[in-house]
Image: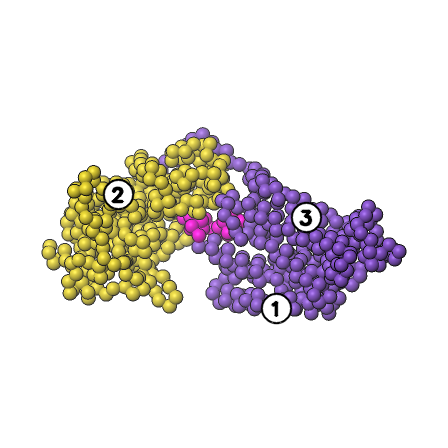
Amino acid sequence: MSDRPFLQIQQISKSFALGKARIDAVRAVSMTIAEGETFGLVGESGSGKSTLGRLAIGLMKPDAGSVRASGVDLVTASPAKLREMRKSLQIVFQDAQSALNGRVSVASNIMEPLVIHNQGTPSERLRRIGGLLERVGLTAAHGPAMPDELSGGQLQRVMIARALALGPKLLVCDEILSALDLSVQAQVLSLLEDLRLTEHLAYLFISHNLSAVSYLSQVIGVMYLGELVEWAPTKSLLEKPGHPYTKALFDSILDVPESKAARKPLTILPGDIPSVIDRPKGCPFHTRCPLTMDICRTVPPQLVQVGEHHHAACHAIHAAG
Amino acid sequence: MVSRVFEGPPVMVPSRSAIWLKGWRRFAANRAALLGLLWLILFGVVALWGRQLAPYSMQYANLFAGNEGPSLLHPFGTDSLGQDMLTMVMYGLRYTLAVGFGATVVALVVGVFIGLTSGMAGRLLDEGLMRLTDFVYAFPGFLFAAFIVGAFHGQTEVVILAFGLTQWAGFARLTRGLVLTVRHSELVESGRAIGASRAFIALRYILPQVVNSIIVYTAFVAVNIITLQAELSLFYGTGPALPLISFGQLISQGTADVLGYWWLLVLPVGTLISLLVALVVVGEGLQAALNPKGNRIL
């Protein structure tokens, strides 16, 4: 694990207007992603993962806090500087079919970033597109195809090639597996890991898929109602999950051993994720938490270090530790 | 660290004409659409050069050969005055297509302009334009057009404006909706992610999406306007003064004589219906041609 931080996020918040109400999509989140490291981000739908991903690469501006990538503050950067930073900060979307331009060929889609940033001569671009296609496991023969002629997995590879075109340092992967078949998911995962090792890419890997996240990530962060409630190195988080929400999340993984006797009972969290409009006071998780104490209902817990590189925001742990 | 440049065998990029050819194949794969297009071209030719092509003149009348059924001399028969019905239908086509085409273009230009402005503009202007659109949508445009057509004796330019200025609201709503959808789509977001400028996104992503859907919608608006205009003559008796003649007038004369002289009603009505059907199937074909993903716009 490299310790040189590439992306540093400090106390960022973002809220959106929903009718007359304002909803907090992301609340006071701080995190760091090191060069060439995968930061896995898990949490239920609506927990603010995707918003955090967009804030991380400057596609959205936070209401408060700072985002620094290789020392450049994305919040205060000029539009020209921000456009320059686009080269090192890229994103791959869940639905490649709708994120790609269906009216032009695969090759033209990959060429767009090269044209926008004025990279290479026209003939160099064609060779680079060929190289990119091969790097993501396709061939130059896929270039002239139209996006609708490719399968979901192939499209996701095209999306990755397009994101790689400018030589990024950080790739945000926003639920990129959820539209793919299981066997294709495995192929894309191993491609990502291969790219990390050979191209020294860092990822912010956003997913529901806990096994994929644990496979790929060096560090995992858990989000709940827009807050980062726990983050730790993968090993530490899997062995000693601190926050009761993290425990519940990992207990909900369907694990089916051979014998019926060996199966552990499924623990299911009571209730649903609370409404972001009517967010609970105190700890956001106290409405569903098995360990709720009086303090949880009034005082929001702070994210504090509970082990080596292991951070959690929970009164119960703080009281015990 | 300098990021690596990927090198590989050069790819082929399909030319623009190859992409058009693919679209044309998708259109032509629909036999009905192809047939409809040929039919529309035939009608277009008749409308443009009808005076030269018509077998008789509008002044021709042979009172001794009135109410004759279809024959080699008069394929569509003759009316009670002995006028050639094929000639009348050809003149009717000329007027109907002029009004239908002209009014659709007026509605298209006004509606798309208002819809684009509304979709791109800030909240206040958007609200104002949409309330205006709602008003035009709810306004009894048919009655307005009837009044105008009656007052100006169906003068072609006036009728075009009357229909165009009452039928643009659908275009405005469609365009605004499309712009808003595309503006917040993953496509535009992925464009922003690679650092594309506003102009690049507007020209490469938003415009093609909007234009394609509008082309398809246009065929259906044309159907609507042609039908309205025929109904206008049929129910209110309003229409152009001779030598111009509208389909509605032909049909309304035909309804009086339908017993005994079927061709006076059936053949003009059949021609009008075939025009409308051709427009609809061409619209369907355009959906297939312009939407490689196969999802229908309308």
> Circles 1 and 2: CB distance less than 8 Å?
no
Give coordinates of residue B93: x percent, y percent.
73, 54
Residue A25 image point, x, y percent: 32, 58
Residue found at x 47% / y 65%: B123
Image point 58% across, 54% down: which residue?
B217
Where is residue A84 drawn, in percent x and y?
40, 47
Q: Is residue A242 left or right of residue B190?
A: left
Q: Which mark is residue B40?
A: 3
Observer-nearest of A113 and A300: A300
- Say whether mark 1 and mark 3 are on the same chain: yes
Magenta span covers which residues?
Answer: B185-210
Q: Which residue is mark 2?
A: A211
* Label pair 3/2, CB-CB below 8 angstroms: no
Q: Secondary structure at mark 1?
A: loop
Q: Residue furthest left?
A: A320
* Residue B297 position (above or below residue A214): below
Q: Tell me where residue A197 sits by quadrant.
A: top left
Instruction: Name which residue type carries label 1.
Output: Pro
- Circle on res. B140: 1
Write the residue at 78% across / 63% down. Answer: B241
Work out whether residue A161 can be spotted: no
Residue found at the far front of this picture: B260
Vertical position of residue B292 compared to residue A279: above or below: above
Q: How many marks?
A: 3
